[in-house]
Image (cartoon, rainbow, N blue to C red):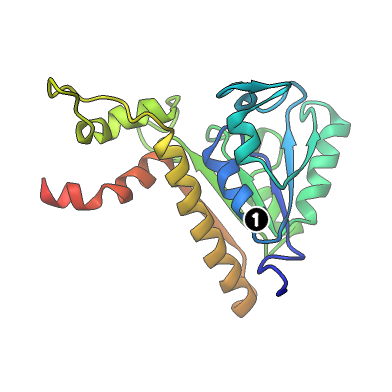
Amino acid sequence: MDEPAFSGLRVVDFSQGIAGPHCGMLLAQHGAEVIKVEPIHGDWCRELGKRYGDLSSNSLIFNRGKRSIALDLKNPDGLAIAKSLCKSADVIMENYRPGVMAKFGLEEKSVRPGNPTVIYYSVTGFGQEGPNSKLPATDSVVQAYSGLMSANLDHRGIPQRVGILAIDIATGLYGFQAVSAALYRRAMKGTGAHIETSLMESIGAFQSTKMVDY
């Protein structure tokens, strides 16, 4: 059997929820060693869906194939471990609000000097900059804001939420595609990358034909 495409690569996954973890899970399915860094109280995805012990249906699906470590980044020892992991990573993933990783010295520009060719992947709700960048975002919020619900009308013609976490899942797929392309470029040219995306950008791309029609 052929060796998986990403065998030998290390991914350090700080992301929580679904959009980031879905990307990390796909990298693991293709052979990468994915180390999921959770806060001490656990990824909030453990509360999404039907519970199974300290996990849930969503956390089981979108984190399968990963190794896990719980770190308190406000503790100097925990932060030192996180920084050490970042130095050895081929890919680093995070989906915190803009500025949060910088508080710990774990944002892309702080990590880059010690790991010049790393692929650093950042996911937000509405982007790193702009009037909505600081706003909280969930799949349901962005379904409404983006107009996706208008494509899912009930019998009265009233927009309804799509019954699965469609935007999170789509963002994970787009993220996997972008990270894979960046890893190929690194293999060919030896250069790292900082990939920034958002839930809003992903569903915008997903609905591009509807926007043109409109």
Residue positioned most to the right? 77
Q: How many marks?
A: 1
Q: Please give the name of the residue rendered at 62% of the width and 24% of the height, measured from the top-left corner.
A: 44
Q: Nearer the viewer, residue 196 or 44?
A: 44
List x then y, in percent, for residue 137: 43, 28
Residue 213 as seen in the image, left or right of residue 185:
left
Residue 90 as seen in the image, left or right of residue 15:
right
What amino acid is labelled 1 in the image?
Gln
List x then y, in percent, for residue 34: 72, 50
Helix, strand or loop for disc 1:
helix
Q: Nearer the viewer, residue 19 or 90?
A: 19
List x then y, in percent, for residue 31: 70, 61
Residue positioned most to the bottom? 188
In the rendered image, the quadrant that contains the C terminus is top left
Q: Please give the name of the residue rendered at 20% of the width and 32% of the height, measured from the top-left corner.
A: 150
Q: Quadrant of residue 189?
A: bottom right
Q: Please give the name of the residue rendered at 65% of the width and 55% of the height, measured from the top-left corner.
A: 29
Position above or below: 33 against 59: below
List x then y, in percent, for residue 155: 15, 23
Position above or below: 181 against 22: below
Residue that mark 1 sits on: 29
Position above or below: 12 against 166: below
In the rendered image, the quadrant that contains the N terminus is bottom right
Q: Quadrant of residue 59?
A: top right
Within 10 Å of disc 1 (Cα), the crowding (few <14, some 14-19, many 20+) is: some
Residue 140 as seen in the image, left or right of residue 94:
left
